[in-house]
Amino acid sequence: MSGGTQPTYLAFDIGGTKVASGFVTLPAAAGDTPIVTGRCSIPTEAARGGDDLKRRIVALAMRQLEQAAAEDVTITGIGIAAAGVPDSETGVIVAATDILPGWRGQRIYDAFADVTDLPVRMIGDVGAHGLGEASYGAGRGKGVVLSIGVGTGIGGAIVVDGGLFTGAHGVAGHAGHVPSALGRGFLCSCGTREGHIEPVASGTGLKDLYNRRLEGAHEGADAADTAVEAGGDVPEPASSGADVAARAAAGEPLACAVLADSARALGECIGGMGNLVDPDVIVVSGSVVKAGPIWWDALRDGFAESALALVKPTPLVEGALGGDAPLIGAAAAVRQYVQSR
């Protein structure tokens, strides 16, 4: 097996739950689709600390490079989509939440330089997702792409003419940390309770919003009427955002209300982002986008209510690359880096 004249990169997607990897062959022709092979993953096991995680990522890289050599795949470079806020120039993780204890301050480029002389480029995981979708997915061919990832958390990326815009401090696109009245009182991953959208509209946030309202139902508040208006008992706490979506799909009134309120609030926030960025397209990806028509209808309603007249027609579309998007984006980032040297 060989990448031929099309370059193949070893890519990583480092998240709070797992570290995914694969060989990404980027197409020579603009309209072609990248090929991802050699997919594998290891659990992040965040509790073991940042030093341990870094060592296991490098060990995974060595196994992947050995596999590539065995399959006659020539690796041109290594692209990394990393959780937290990485410095792409120095290879240092400059900020990270408590989801990955000890991750902040890790020197990733130095660790890879000890085992390989291949060029390495690291960008944020949500930025990589956006770059993948903008380059080869639902945003392909558009000049300005706003990418929103709605999964365990909420993140975003701004891609302009094929380049990732990271801002002065590397944090541009942090879509989960824009204000929302619905989020007031909920603890955000950044530490505030003043009202961000992530703690009520991410997958985890859907669960927390549902369970907070359910507490009111158990206490006899107005939410009880919503929960049992169809004649049933007050439901048990939700275990996940997917659980809330499943209950909504089954017609449970409380779940339907939570799903719609959460999506509408997120849509309003995306409308505000659209007003600021004025993108050609807004790509929405992540596990929560599978929540169904209640979620999508409310998201689009909230966006329409918040967006300016000239921004309102901007299409909101579902991402096309699925879980491969960060790997493809990481490969695109290292290719850009190699070409610029």
Image (cartoon, rainbow, N blue to C red):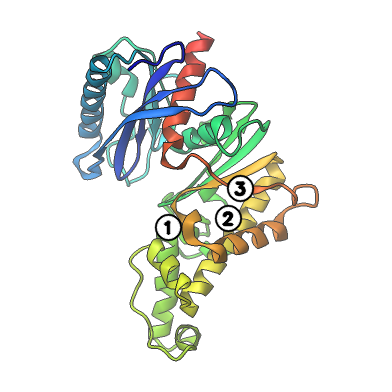
**What secondary structure is marked by label 1?**
helix
First in sequence: mark 1 or mark 3?
A: 1
Q: Are marks 2 and 1 in contact (CB under 8 Å)?
A: no
Q: The residue under label 2 is which amino acid type?
A: Pro
Task: Please state which amino acid type lies under the numbered disc 1.
Answer: Gly
Give the spatial CA distance, label 2 vs label 1: 18 Å
Q: Kindly identify the amino acid type of the residue bearing the numbered disc 3.
A: Val
Is 143 displayed left or right of 201 in the figure? Answer: right
Mark 2 lies on residue: 179
Q: Residues within 10 Å of mark 2 (few under 14, many from 20)?
A: some
Secondary structure under the numbered disc 2 in the rendered image: loop
Give neighbour class at mark 1: few <14, some 14-19, many 20+ (Cα, 10 Å).
many
Q: Residue furthest bottom?
A: 231
- At 41% from the left edge and 41% from the top edge, which residue is drawn? 323
Mark number, residue 287:
none
Give the labeled residue for mark 3.
317
Taking depth in this image into account, of 99 and 293 the one nearest to the observer is: 293
User: Up-down: is 329 above or below 267?
Assistant: above
Drawn side of residue 231 relative to residue 268, left or right = left
Whether label 3 touches label 2, CB < 8 Å:
no
- In percent of width and height, residue 175 lies at 54, 46
Residue 203, numbered circle? 1
- On the picture, is 104 further left or further right than 318? left
The mark closer to the camera, 2 or 1, is 1
x, y percent for residue 79: 40, 23
Q: Residue at x 37, y 39 (%)?
A: 96
Q: Position of residue 220 (x, y in %)?
A: 42, 89
